[in-house]
Image (cartoon, grey):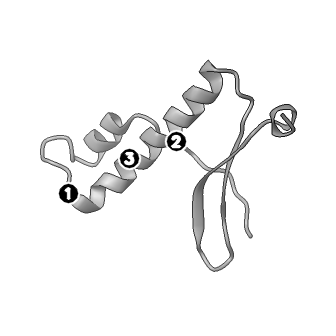
Amino acid sequence: MTQRDRLLFFDVGVRNALLQLHRRPLTRDQLGPVFEPWFTLQVLYLDRAFRKGWSVSSYRTESGAEVDLVVEPSPSRRDA
């Protein structure tokens, strides 16, 4: 597996404006890239709001297979 930092560009409206996408409906192939950061942010907000202490990460294999979101419980909650 390879590891590198990820940048989560969370403001999809700004992204769409920069790409000139904000004036027309999203196509089916654009929905995933819009949904992924929204979902990831919801998980991060839930973790912070309820003080879950989750470890949130992602990974990619050397062949390019990718897991966008890995959520692990905090060590203290894992045994509970």
Helix, strand or loop status at disc 1: loop
Mark found first going from the N terminus, 3 or 1: 1
Tell me if residue 40 comes above or below residue 3 in the rendering: above
Q: Is residue 53 left or right of residue 7?
A: right
Residue 69, percent from left and from top: 59, 51
- Relative depth, front residue between 6 and 34: 34
**Would you name the residue on which mark 2 appears?**
40
**Would you name the residue on which mark 1 appears?**
27
- Relative depth, front residue between 20 and 30: 30
**Would you name the residue on which mark 3 appears?**
35
Residues packed near mark 3 inside 10 Å, few (<14), some (14 to 19) or many (20 plus): few
Residue type, numbered disc 3: Phe
Residues packed near mark 2 inside 10 Å, few (<14), some (14 to 19) or many (20 plus): some
For this orientation, the residue located farthest to the front is: 80
Q: How many marks?
A: 3
- Asked if disc 2 and disc 3 are in contact, CB closer than 8 Å, the reply is no
For image coordinates 60% across by 19% down, the residue present is 49
Mark found first going from the N terminus, 1 or 2: 1
Residue 64, percent from left and from top: 59, 74
